[in-house]
Amino acid sequence: MFILIKKGHVIAPCEVYFSEGVDPMSTVLQDEPLHFQLALQPVRTNRIDSMLNYINAIEPGICIERARYLTESYKETEHLPYIIRRARALENILKKMSIYILPGSLLVGNQSSKPCFAPLFPEFTVDFLEEEILQGKPMYPYERPSDKFNVDKEIVPELQDIINWWKGRTHKERVYANLPEEAILAQDAVGAVNIVNFLHGGDGHLAPPYKWLFDHGVGHIIALCRQKLAEIDLTTPEGLESKRFYEAVIISCQALIDWAHRYAELAEAEAARETEESRRSELRKLAEICRRVPEHPARTFHEALQFMTFVQVAIQIEDNAQGICPGRFDQVLWEHYQRDVSRGILNRDQALELVQNFFVVLSTIERIRSWNDTDYFRGKPIFQNLTIGGINPETGEDASNELTYIVLDAIANTRTLQPSHYARWHKKAPEKYKMKVAETIRLGTGFPAIANDELYIPAMMNRGYDLKDASDYCIVGCAEPGVAGLRGGRTGAAWFCLAKILEVTLYGGRDPRTGVMLHPNCNGKDLSSFESYDEVWEAFVDQVKYYIRLHVLMDNITDKLWEEYIEEPLTSALGCPTTCLERGRSIKKGGAKYDFTGNETIGLANVANSLYAIKYVVFDQKLITGTQLLHALKTNFEDMTTDPTGPEIQQMCLLAPKYGNDQDEVDFVARDVLALVCEELPKYKNTRYGRGPIGGVFQASTTTVSSNTAFGRMVGALPDGRQTGTPLSDGQSPMRGTDTLGPTAAVRSVAKLRNVLLSEGSLYNLKLLPQDLKD
Amino acid sequence: MAAQAGLRRLVNLIDYYFSIGGMQMQFNVVSKETLLRAQKDPDKYRNLIVRVAGYSAYFVNLDKTVQQDIIERTEERI
């Protein structure tokens, strides 16, 4: 029985509960006794503390080095195949970029010349670099009200040259040249579908198979490619294509090894200058590790973590990808941890410090987006997700171990935004684990989020994963499942603003903000002329299908041009080595075992509530006519000259039942709307379909990032009572403030959605109060 | 365990949601009052991390509209 979830009870504010060993006098903010994160000081070693202080003192900036060395290389390789050009450019970057060792760090790997400096990726787009960094339109990156970046004036002339060279050669220009006019309008005018994120950088959203990499080493990948090169038939088109791929992988992997050796030299040089004996020996050990990995298999926990750090950072240097993920961290590092502990060369505290050190290094990674795209990604998320817990794919039993708890301790005490964290949850998860996860959540950092094995696994199997692979899933973005080393494709894919699609439906197919009419309603009606709720639904379904078609063609065009002009040899070799190397092709050409293109559906609660409000107010209760409601929407519920007045109509709309209160009539509308998207998308194939991977179709998710505020600005007043320009609902959560009957009712509503269809991930945000978790 | 009744209620809430078909959950554990104080005095709250949607961020570094969205989210009582 599940009880204990009380409705509306009030606990008087009182002293915070301090866990054992924490000194209540150490509160950071005396007037915040009820906020755990602020009241409980993180416990960390001086090393971690000083590294964090060092990084936090640096204001985010822009680093030109990657753009410089990339461009230098591209100018010299115009005669070469694209995948080789890409490999040569990465080689040049890794050879020449500035490298550093954070003071006191036991791990190395940097993405740009300074911590928290964003590298530039001019091969994707230069328009915003020119407008924002050079011309200050609409503002310079250092003038932004949030998500700022400093710009060193000295880089400006060189950046201008780089931009000039890339004009006419960028991914974004190629995509725009290939998009049909209606798709461009759907994105830039109507704001119903949006792929801008993927015009700025790579796809990412994958977890390299770290266990496999630790066991084999990158040197093994090079050896495999050499062997394949000796075997392929160069008289066939396939053979010629594979030759390019293998050659590009060899160049990229060797560049990665050489990059690691540069760190070995740097550590040796720093050791020679170091006066303190203990640090000198740490630097010498670090040098040895960098000579060892990633070229050779990792023998120790420390070597494995350094291997992982190099791979994480290098992939993000290759193509600006988000969501490059450590995967099931407590599983992939378990053998090394256990072995080192039993050999007496590692204890729990040392492992914890190394894990925290790893978090700190991952936190140095930055990404600059255009000001416009920033609106969809506020707060600079990078999405390097780390997953703990879950079942063992071989036995189905709980897989948590001591490292699981080390990660939870590291989350509580490092408090960095990167990596991001997920805890898997299942029926056999031990109480100790669940309570420890709950205690970590209580800190209020949002870490870890929780994923239900009993839904994620069948959702993946429904799209073709086999049981064992699905059981080994990890989260590879906001909420999207992947399997380390086996999933390619593009989980992010287009934003899909359902709320805008409903809005155009109410206006006969016309976007009221811009006047653009892309697809008239199939029944030729609008809110003033619909004669029944069924007619509203019929028109809405048809509009959803129309915009899904645009969503698909926009994603497929992006992918096709990516495959033809960009490529990613390093990501393919490290991300999906077993299949890409066997097939002799990159992920974008069908190299992965599983491949799906995703979706991000925005505004579900607004759409469900609005559809239901129309049914309730106009057709069932007949309180007002559709014409009256449409006028109220057009006037943002502000017209005082009508009877009833705008505000009165808004009240009627707000009083209609809302999703999130366990009321079937409206919850089922939400269920049907989401199922419509979930079932329509997989009817479409992506560009890898039939080229090797299992899947090869589109699939739905309800992840929003901060796009609900960005899209909200473009969506007018809706029949749910929401006013124009205000944020839409997030994920598949009830609209904020409308789930009024307590958490039991709220979760019962959200569980009525057919979540198992969300094979690209489900997102439900819940806000709790610290005082309810104190006892 | 009696001292952890609040955490137990949170575990029960997750167990319950997942037992009836829930797939994913993520949390903020923060009061509106704390967030409003952070808006007023960002320097003092510069380390305050909150959940946005699919990721976490420093509250005071978020755009005002996103801050408002988080402030207005329903405070569920358990």
Image: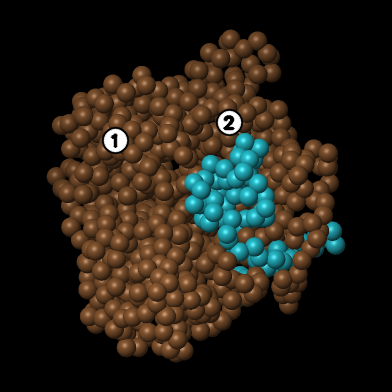
Chain colours: A brown, B cyan
Answer left or right for A656 relative to A31.
left
On whether disc 2 and disc 1 are found on a single subunit, the reply is yes
Q: Secondary structure at mark 2?
A: helix
Q: Residues within 10 Å of mark 2 (few under 14, many from 20)?
A: some
Host chain of mark 1: A
Can residue A496 be seen in the rendering of this structure? Answer: yes
Q: Which residue is mark 2?
A: A56
* Lower sequence index among marks 2 and 1: 2
Local packing at callout 1 (Cα closer than 10 Å; few below 14, some 14-19, many 20+) is some
Q: Which residue position is annotated with label 1? A: A131
* Point 67% across, 53% down: residue: B33
Q: Are marks 2 and 1 in contact (CB under 8 Å)?
A: no
Residue visible at 42% across and 34% down in the picture:
A143
Nearest-to-viewer mark from 2 and 1: 1
Tell me the kind of residue under disc 2: Asn
Q: Is residue A407 above or below residue A357?
A: below
SS at circle 1: helix
Residue type, label 1: Glu
Name the subunit of mark 2.
Answer: A
Which residue extends farthest front?
A: A641
- Camera-side residue of A221 and A175: A175
Instruction: Give how far across and how far down residue A627 sits, in percent.
Output: 33, 80
Q: How far is disc 2 from disc 1 in space, using C-alphas?
A: 28 Å
Quadrant of the rendering where the N terminus of chain A is positioned: bottom right
Quadrant showing the C terminus of chain A: bottom right
